Every structure is written in C-alpha cells, then in structure tokens.
C-alpha cells in the first residue's frame, strides 16, 4: 500500500513539474514575442522618422500625414514631430571658400530682355501705366515657352513706380554679391546680421529696400547714418528707398525686391533674399557654398514645413485670412483648369510649396526668367507667392532646376523677430465675390491682381478644386 501511495505521489509530482515547465515556457514565449513585436514597432517608427527627414520622393510619400501607418502610430503616441532646427553642413572657414570664376551657363535661355513700355497705356487708353503692365492672356501663355531669346513682362514698366534715387542706382552698380531684404508700411525695423566674416563684409552689399512710410518709421526708432554721398545706413544695411510704391497692397509691394532682385540690382551675380523680420545668423558666403556651389545648383529655396500641395497652402491661407477667400479660390480654379495637379510622389520635386522667406540664387538667364514669370503670377493674381511658385515650375516643364532644402535647415539660418504690428487689410476678410461689386466697395486693388477681374479665356464654371486634407493645426 505504501508503495502505491508513493507511486501516486511521484506521478503527481511529475505532473506538477511538467505544468511548471510548461507555464514557464509559455511565459518565455510570450515575453520573446512581445520583445520582437516592440522591436518591429521601434524599427517602423525609426523608419518613418527617417522618411520624414529624407528628400527622396518615395520616403516623403511614406511620411505623408495621410498615411494609415502614420495615423495609427499617431494614435498610439509614437509619431515624432520633425525637428524645428537642425545642424547645417556648412564649410568651416569663409576665408578658404573658392568662389567660381565663371558664371553658370544656360542651355535653354541665352538672351533675356524685358518689355518696358505698356502697350495698353500708350494706345490712347485711359488706363494708367502699371508697374507690371497690362499683360494679356496670350502673352502670359507665350511666356511659358522658353526659347534661346525671349522678351517678357517683368515689372518696372516706364512710369509704373518703384523708382530708385540716382545715388542708390550708382551704389548698387558695384554690387556683385547681394544680401537683400525689404520693409514696407513700417512693419519691421532692420535687424543686424551676426557671425559675418570680414571677407563677407567686404564682398557683399547688404541692401534693405524700403518705402517712404518705413523709412520715416526707421528714422524715428533707430539711428540712421548718412555717408558723404548721401547714402543712408542702419548698421551694415544700406537703405534703398523706392519712390511711388507700385501697388496699393504693402504685401504685394514687398514682392518687388523679393522676386525681382535681379531687376533692382542688375549687376548682381548672386543674391540671398531674407524677409525683413529676420536676423541672419549665418555667414552669407557659407550659405552660397552650401546651397549653390557645393551641389552645383543655381537656385535654392526651403521646403514648406507643413504643405506640399498648393491647394493645401491655399486652404491654410483662407483659414488664416491671409487674403480674400473667394479670390484665392478663383486663383486656384485657374491653375487647376490649366492642369496643375496636387503634389504627389510621382512629381519630380519633393514639394510644390516653398518657404519663401529665404531665396538663394545665381542670376542666370533661366533663373531670371523664372523670377519674372513668378512675379507676373503674383502681379496678376493674389500676392501669396507660395501659391504661384510650384505652378511656374510646372509650366516650365522640368526645365527649371532648383534645390529645395529641408525646412529644419531653413530655421537654423536666422532668428525670427515679431513684426512691429500685425498686418491687416479689409480685403482679407471678404467672404464672397458679391462684396467686390460696385465702385464704392473700396476692396479691389487698382494696380494689382487684375487677372482676377479680367475675363478669363476658359470656362471655370465647372472647375471643382481638389479636396484638401488639413495636415496641421498651424498650417
């Protein structure tokens, strides 16, 4: 009997041990599976974070805010925001940078000239001379067909405004390297660049374009020094006043020096544009080496932080009341009618929307043509130049090459200062085209945006704008 009970006890003991072993094995399997699962998730997160930093179209598509993977990771709290600032791979010593001895050559456009006389204003019409001219729809269409020799509208029509004083014209003729900025309607005061080498101080002209309102505001708030030739200076900045502002809208006036830098300063070979609210903290010679010469580029601009499609940018402009909503819609309908599709990974560019506050360029004929066409769109339609950039790239059919660098590098190039006051215009609050009817509305600009009021040759009645998925609250 004793042996029987002992055998039963041994069987039960073995069963118990088997159960313990099985339970331990199961726990280990669960733990290993969990660890593998977490590693897969971590690998996926790291891959998506890398994709968001990559300039490859395929990777950018994976990083799209509309991605189901991104959506799921976002709900789980795993998606990391791209960095606001990141290190720029700059050369170490401005004194050792070799400046190219020859200008870059264009194979497409060799000779570019500009229409200076406004035909409509000279044929007996009562229409006053316009800075941008009365460009016809057929002239606009022809301008998008690059040829060896071209003559296009490019602002600065005779008696159209934006005139420089003779002393300033004489000064800028010597400027081959330019850092340009602009202040209009007294929104800012000049901010002195920092970390500028002695070589760059001698090489570059720092030119701040202002209107009369801004010049008076600057004189009242900061010290303006006058040299022996009558030139006006605020620190390193030479003030370049423009008489007779060409537009009613200060934002549109600011596009003249920003986009038409090659027209204001025709002797310049290289230019860096920065918005007036910015304090540059990178040596301009290092900027040219990084964004032009190193990669053999001639035009560089930053990628927008949030948007790749102009229709996304248009939606954001309407939400933030940056211009009249119905006019932005009309602008976008014309572009969509003319074949401009929303950005997608199959396009040759990583984005259709730039961050236009910094523009780095060599003034080649093709780049100058692009700038003219870009400005003409701003002149014809809305002053929101980010809506027009990608469209002009599209119309040139891949002939215009440019480098679009990461937004985090853009944010590492400057310190952003607040405006002296917020810009506000009645036209920004308009909700329907009916509010523009009548001569006493006071909302229509009289010298810009006329393409939105000139009968368009196509039928826009059945144009439906592409749906927009809002990609950011800040957008």
Image (tube, helix red, strand yellow):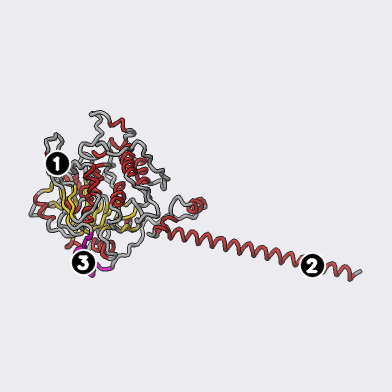
- The spot of residue 276 in percent (x, y) is 24, 50
Tell me which numbered mark, 1 or 3, is placed earlier along the sequence: 3
Q: Nearer the viewer, mark 1 or mark 3?
A: 1
The residue drawn where x is 21% and y is 54% is 147
Q: Which residue is mark 2?
A: 13
Kind of element beneath mark 2: helix
Spatial CA span between label 3 and label 2: 87 Å
Q: Secondary structure at mark 1?
A: helix
Q: Nearer the viewer, residue 109 or 53?
A: 109
Callout 3: SS = loop
- For label 3, the crowd category at 10 Å Cα-Cα, with few meaning under 14, some 14 to 19 and many 20 or more, is few
- The residue closer to the viewer here, 274 or 463, is 463
Between discs 2 and 1, the one toward the N terminus: 2
- Which residue, given by chain and number where applicable, does mark 3 sit on? 100
- Taking 97 as reference, is 174 left or right? left
The residue under label 1 is 119
The percent position of residue 406, horizontal first and vertical second, equals: 35, 58
- Is 353 in front, or is 357? 353
> In this rendering, would 65 be left or right of 286?
right
Using the rendered view, name the quadrant where residue 202 is placed.
bottom left
| Region in magenta | 92-107
Q: Earlier in the sequence, mark 3 or mark 2?
A: 2
Residue 341: image location, x then y, percent: 36, 48
307 inside magenta stretch: no
Q: Main secondary structure of the magenta part?
A: loop
Crowding near the residue tagged with mark 2, few <14, some 14–19, many ≥20 C-alpha atoms within 10 Å: few
């Amino acid at each position: 009997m004793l042996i029987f009970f002992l055998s039963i006890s041994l069987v039960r003991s073995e069963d118990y041990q088997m159960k313990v072993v099985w339970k331990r094995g199961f726990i280990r399997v669960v733990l290993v599976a969990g660890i593998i699962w977490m590693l897969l998730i971590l690998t996926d997160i790291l891959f998506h974070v890398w994709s968001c930093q990559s300039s490859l179209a395929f990777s950018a598509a994976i990083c799209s805010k509309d991605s189901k993977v991104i959506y799921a990771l976002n709900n789980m709290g795993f998606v990391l925001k791209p960095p606001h600032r990141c290190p720029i791979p700059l050369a170490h010593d401005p004194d050792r940078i070799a400046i190219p001895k020859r200008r870059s050559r264009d194979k497409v456009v060799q000779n570019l000239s500009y229409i200076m006389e406004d035909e409509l204003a000279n044929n007996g019409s009562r229409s006053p001379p316009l800075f941008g001219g009365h460009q016809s729809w057929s002239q606009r269409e022809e301008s998008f067909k690059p040829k060896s020799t071209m003559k296009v509208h490019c602002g600065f029509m005779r008696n159209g405004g934006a005139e420089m004083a003779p002393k300033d014209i004489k000064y800028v003729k010597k400027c081959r390297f330019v850092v340009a900025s602009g202040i209009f309607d007294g929104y800012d005061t000049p901010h002195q660049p920092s970390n500028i080498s002695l070589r760059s101080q001698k090489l570059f002209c720092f030119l701040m374009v202002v209107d009369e309102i801004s010049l008076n505001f600057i004189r009242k708030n900061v010290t303006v020094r006058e040299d022996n030739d009558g030139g006006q200076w605020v620190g390193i900045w030479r003030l370049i006043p423009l008489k007779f502002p060409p537009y009613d809208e200060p934002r549109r006036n600011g596009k003249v020096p920003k986009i038409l830098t090659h027209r204001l300063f025709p002797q310049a070979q290289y230019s860096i544009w920065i918005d007036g609210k910015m304090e540059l903290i990178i040596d301009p010679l290092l900027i040219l080496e990084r964004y032009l010469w190193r990669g053999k580029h001639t035009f560089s601009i930053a990628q927008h932080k949030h948007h790749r499609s102009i229709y996304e940018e248009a939606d954001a402009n309407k939400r933030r009341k940056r211009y009249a909503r119905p006019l932005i819609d009309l602008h976008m309908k014309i572009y969509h009618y003319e074949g401009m599709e929303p950005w997608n990974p199959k396009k040759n560019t990583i984005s259709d929307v730039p961050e236009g506050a910094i523009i780095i360029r060599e003034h080649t004929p093709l780049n100058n043509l692009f700038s003219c066409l870009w400005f003409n769109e701003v002149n014809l339609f809305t002053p929101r130049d980010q809506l027009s950039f990608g469209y002009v790239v599209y119309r040139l059919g891949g002939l215009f090459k440019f480098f679009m660098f990461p937004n985090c590098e853009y944010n590492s190039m400057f310190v952003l200062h607040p405006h002296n006051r917020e810009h506000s215009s009645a036209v920004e609050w308009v909700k329907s085209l009916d509010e523009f009817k009548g001569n006493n509305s006071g909302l229509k600009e009289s010298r810009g945006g006329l393409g939105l009021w000139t009968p368009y040759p196509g039928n826009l009645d059945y144009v439906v704008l592409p749906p927009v998925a809002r990609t950011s609250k800040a957008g």
